[in-house]
Amino acid sequence: MSDKTIETDVLVIGAGGGGFRAAIGAREEGVKAVLVSKGPLSKCGATVLAGADLTADGRGLRELGFFGEPRDSKETWFSDIVHQGFYLANQKLLQRYVEDAPERIRELLDWGIKVSFSEERAIFTTGSGILRALFREAKRCGVQMIEDMMILDLLVDDGQVTGAIGLDIHTGEFVTFVSKAVVIATGGWHLAYSPTTGTRELSGDGIAMAWRAGATLAHMEFVTFCCNILLWPPHWLGSLFTYILHTLVGGTVTNSEGQRFLDKYDPYTVQVGSSTEWNKAFVSFASAKEIRAGKGSPHGGVYYEVGDIPWEVFDNTVTSYYPGWEYKGVDYSALQKMLRDGEPVEVGPAVEYFEGGISVNEHLETDIRGLYAAGECTAALFGANRVSAATTEMLVTGAVAGRTAGRYASSAGMPGIDVTQVAAIEGKALEPLRRDAGTRPPDLKGHIQRTAHEKLGSIKTKEEIEDLIALLEQVKEKELPELCTSSKSRSYNKEWIEALELHNIVPVLETSAHASLARTESRGVHYRDDYPDTDNDGWIKEVTVKEVDGELCLGTCPITVTTLTPPKGTAPYLEMMKRMMEAHSDVGGHH
């Protein structure tokens, strides 16, 4: 049995913005809340790396005292997100997003965030500033916070969540959490890929444990690859800085033959698809086409350069935002010199955001009683393409999930714990420490990450997806059962943590691959080279994945529609993308 037991009304797993806001929401309902962080509090996860923009309708921002576009409305913003998500958004969930966004921003202002500037539909602050404000509020309202605690699995009895088993990363001790309700807010599965823009905590833990508990996953085929991510030299791998430079200042991307390959596409698509957040889907698609045609850089990307912009203009614009060419505490003056001297800078698509995850309704309830989810680990808010802020998503969904969980917990009794289930989870976790020989976790993880990037990237085919699925089947049968750590210490054993994470990375990546294979069309951030059309007649529906008796079961279900009915018809992917760009209003800039 565990070395320690903690009882609470609501257990929140994940200490990014969604987790903090969920814990605060539970306390607003008057119940006890425990927040568990896999890393240091307010210093880990995706939120700390965010840009960070907070989006709302222009009129709502204007009412908060910012620039805001007065012609805008919640209805217009809602319509734009539905169109830009290629019609797959859960419209009930999206309605919560657009309705609650201004209030979530207002309270953050009250809690002390600083705003640097605003646009028609966004204000800009920092991810670290958001986390500090949420941390202060969580502390003020009495949330119990525990850092450096990895949750291994949920405890479930007869379709109802009863708690979770955690591992104290510093001591190696197991902790049993007994809880009436659980909110999962663990973000995406970035560590399934390399390169990635995510932090090292983001290994799909929450999605995997919900999957093992019997929850339904949806939209797992929709993975956003951010374009123009630094690929070389290695110490810059995964940095967003060149993406920001290209969006903010401009410049050009070229292939290995020196061709400005965006010039071959429709000018309107290039203009909108390189100056707004459409660029993630469009420029990643165009870059991947060049790489797959053998016109890529030595390290699997393309090239970024200043192009026709006078260097003084380029440099002055960058330094006005990033003095000394410093971004997120990293000195990029060497990149400044490379660009000034015309040296090739290798960039390319890298995993950044996941539209898929745990299936929830507008109350952020899963199909497991007492289990809720918030933020990037949930599915269907944005449909097939996110072009609005995930920072606003985490705040809105976190508040709703926390309050819903709090109301549920206020009338529920404290559950009992199945000691046999606890012993099984802990015994499985200890297996890599007990083996004297076997598969080393870093080697296996690296092989999986590279294969996922190659076979399940921004462009994919049936054969490539099947290759990845075959690899994952082999990993499940042979490598995972033989994982072995070099050190047998339980105290802060990084290799042990990697072994435990692989048991989450593999099933989540497998569900994503099967969903990608099932969707025989191209839509949003999902592009099948063997099915290059967007098929509104056959594929305006969700692909769902569920574990039943140990087997992966695929299905489909209708999307949730309230006011906007999707159109009929089929068209080539880029043509449909252009239609989506043209369909949205002229309100709002880059988010």
Image (spheres, rainbow, N blue to C red):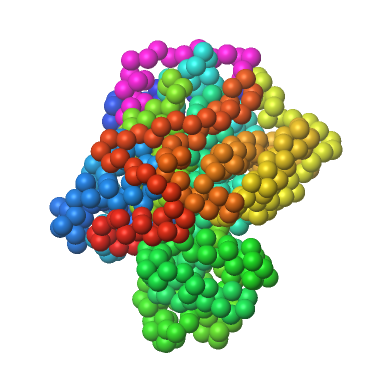
Residue 575 place in picture, x, y as percent: 42, 59
State the extent of the magenta-drawn residues as a range.
Answer: 401-422
Residue 113: image x %, image y %? 30, 54
Pinpoint residue 539: horizontal percent, then vertical percent. Answer: 46, 40
Q: Quadrant of residue 350?
A: bottom right
Residue 21 locus on image (x, y percent): 35, 39
* Depicted 6 relative to depicted 298: above or below: above
Q: Is residue 280 above or below residue 139?
A: below
Locate residue 440: give its quadrant.
top right
> Residue, x 62% and y 35% (percent of image)?
507
Q: What residue appears at the point 40 percent right and 50 percent down from the top-left corner?
A: 386
Q: Is residue 411 above or below residue 329?
A: above
Q: Is residue 7 left or right of residue 287?
A: left
Residue 506 showing in the rendered view? yes
Quadrant in which the C terminus is drawn: bottom left
Query: Would you say residue 419 sits in the magenta stretch?
Result: yes
From the image, give the main secondary structure of the stretch colored magenta: helix
Is residue 77 found inside the magenta-colored segment of the image? Answer: no
Q: Is residue 162 visible?
A: no
Give the residue drawn at x 53%, y 35%: 207
Residue 316 against residue 227 in the figure, above or below: below
